[in-house]
Image (spheres, rainbow, N blue to C red):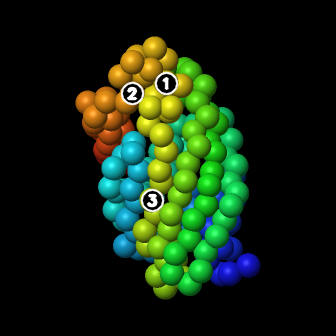
Amino acid sequence: MTPNEALIIKFYTAFANSDFKTMAECYHPKIHFIDPAFGLLKEEQVLKMWEMLLIRSKGNIKIEFFDVKADEFTGSAKWVAAYNFSKTNRNVTNRVSAEFVFQDGLIIKHTDNFDVWKWSKQAFGPTGYLLGWTGFFHKKIQEQALLSLKKFQESK
């Protein structure tokens, strides 16, 4: 196992244990995170996003990860999150592919990719099925996610 594979395993083990502080230890201070829900987040925003998601899940999130690969510079993993989407009270199982870039023994870039339409069908039901594939709906999801993060940061 490479040191960076161990780092990815440490990150996802902490995620599975709702330990956002240990997750934060895995990130470089200049971390950039990108995903379909939040878009691009940087530095403190990334740490607060994970903290917010884990606090709001109230321990009712199940994380599984597998296919961890990494060399000196880049890495990848696949992970699955099963949780209750709070806005609609619907169960979601989200399958995510993650890519990483490392610097100074830490993750400096983390990119998560998932099928927004599949996610929105689960999270929003018929509305997600009908509109979840549209750019308009993706933009609305991102606006709401960023607003939620902003409110969380302001409350801390």
- Between 145 and 56, the residue placed more toward the observer is 145
Task: Report which residue position mark 3 lands on.
Answer: 111
Q: Which residue is mark 1?
A: 121
**Mark identifier at residue 42:** none
Which element is circle 1 on? helix
CB atoms of marks 2 and 1 within 8 Å:
yes
Residue sitting farthest toward the right: 1
Q: Position of residue 83 (x, y in %)?
A: 61, 33
Q: Is residue 144 above or below residue 156?
A: above
> Along the polypeptide, which appears first: circle 1 or circle 3?
3
Across and down, in percent, residue 124 comes to 46, 21
Amino acid type, callout 2: Gly
Q: Amino acid at mark 3?
A: Thr
Q: Is residue 58 visible?
A: no
54 horizontally vs 155: left or right = right
Q: Quickly name the residue at label 2.
A: 132
Look at discs 2 and 3 and give the one toward the viewer: 2
Q: Is residue 108 left or right of residue 39?
A: right
Q: Where residue 146 sits: x, y (%)?
A: 32, 42
Q: Residue at x 39, y 18 (%)?
A: 130
Q: Do we see residue 8 in this rendering?
A: yes
Please name the residue shown 43% across and 68% down the image: 109
The percent position of residue 73, horizontal first and vertical second, equals 51, 81
Q: Quadrant of residue 92?
A: top right
Q: Is residue 36 left or right of residue 112?
A: left
Q: From what the image shows, is residue 125 above or below residue 61?
A: above
Residue at 53%, 25% in the rendered image: 122
Screen quadrant of the N terminus: bottom right
Q: CA distance from mark 2 to mark 3?
A: 21 Å
- The tag earlier along the polypeptide, 2 or 3, is 3
